[in-house]
């Protein structure tokens, strides 16, 4: 075999291996979809059908009947978390990147350490605080709790991205008479689109998929997210696996759609600041 053929053969081998690994990782998703379309009487069939030969949409009908309030609550909590995270993280990132406040390095280290605290530890702390403040079993309580996970990440992303904004652009706005807030709002934010999309996406996904905070802080209220809806649905209907899997499929769709639509911005936002000139 010539040297020219070796890279091509190696590339094809890598492609095949990549496809096999992708198929293995995506198989649970496919099986979830398969079970969601499987009739109840075929659920315990051995061996199970690899394809839904007689598909039924009873599970999805059950989702529309039982799970829509949970989905609406998750959407409300997710959007609220995104709004609060951007409100806090974007100005903080700008201050750390361009205004260089006293103690900025220590604050960055503190934010990094905050990312390492286990969620269950934070949930226990929030429970005591929310109990005193009367925020248990409320959707805005979950927004605050979920934002504590998203804000440190958001500050680090914004700081890395905004550090790459040319100082001349900031200086030009100041020469034109713009103050710090006007510069931030009219100059910095518009050019930080990739970071905004990245932080918004991850904030929403964290809030959408949260179970620890929801189960600890909103286990018995009227505003329960879809993660608790699935959890309680399993407990009450543990034989209706097509309905359970249909709920999981529907709950996965927003995250999948957002990831597909925003992947280009996320790649640019996450890698911002990785290379210095």
Image (cartoon, rainbow, N blue to C red):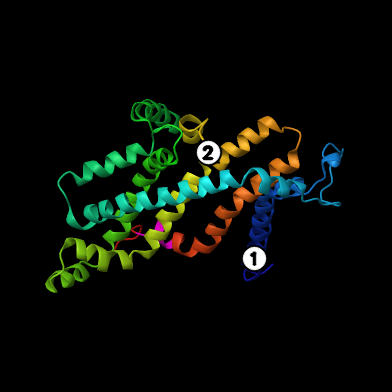
State left or right for residue 268 relative to residue 11: left
First of labels 1, 2 by sequence position: 1
Write the residue at 65% across / 53% down. Answer: 22
x and y percentages locating residue 167 in the rendered image: 20, 66
In the rendered image, which quarter contains the C terminus? bottom left
Which quarter of the picture shows residue 145?
Answer: top left
**Disc 1 to disc 2, how far (Cα)?**
57 Å
Asked whether 128 or 265 is in front, the reply is 128
Image position, residue 89 (x, y; %):
31, 51
Residue identifier under label 1: 6
As drawn, 19 above or below 135: below
Q: Quadrant of the N terminus?
A: bottom right
Judge whether 106 appears above or below 250 on screen: above
Magenta part of the chain:
268-272
Residue at label 2? 224
Residue 28, visible in the rendered structure: no
| Above-or-below relation of 92 to 40 | below
* Count of numbered tags: 2
Left or right side of 205 for 163: left
The percent position of residue 112, horizontal first and vertical second, equals 33, 41
Task: Label 2: state its secondary structure.
Answer: loop
Per the image, is 191 magenta?
A: no
């Amino acid at each position: 075999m010539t040297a020219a053929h070796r890279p091509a053969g190696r590339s094809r081998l890598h492609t095949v291996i990549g496809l096999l690994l992708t198929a293995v990782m995506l198989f649970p998703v496919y099986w979830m979809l398969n079970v969601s379309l499987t009739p109840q009487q075929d659920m315990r069939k051995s061996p199970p059908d690899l394809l839904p030969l007689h598909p039924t949409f009873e599970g999805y009908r059950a989702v529309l009947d039982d799970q829509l309030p949970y989905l609406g609550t998750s959407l409300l909590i997710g959007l609220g978390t995104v709004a609060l995270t951007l409100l806090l993280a974007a100005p903080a990132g700008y201050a750390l990147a361009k205004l260089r406040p006293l103690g900025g390095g220590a604050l960055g280290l503190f934010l990094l350490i905050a990312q390492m605290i286990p969620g269950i530890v934070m949930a226990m702390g929030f429970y005591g605080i929310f109990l005193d403040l009367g925020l248990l079993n409320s959707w805005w309580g979950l927004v605050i709790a979920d934002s504590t996970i998203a804000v440190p990440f958001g500050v680090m992303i914004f700081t890395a991205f905004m550090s790459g904004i040319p100082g001349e652009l900031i200086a030009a706005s100041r020469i034109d008479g713009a103050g710090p807030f006007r510069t931030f709002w009219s100059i910095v934010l518009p050019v930080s689109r990739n970071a905004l999309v990245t932080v918004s996406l991850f904030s929403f996904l964290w809030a959408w998929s949260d179970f620890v905070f929801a189960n600890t802080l909103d286990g018995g209220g009227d505003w329960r997210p879809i993660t608790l809806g699935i959890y309680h649905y399993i407990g009450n209907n543990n034989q209706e696996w097509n309905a359970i899997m249909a709920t999981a499929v529907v709950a996965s769709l927003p995250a999948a759609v957002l990831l597909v639509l925003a992947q280009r911005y996320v790649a640019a936002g996450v890698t911002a600041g990785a290379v210095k000139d």
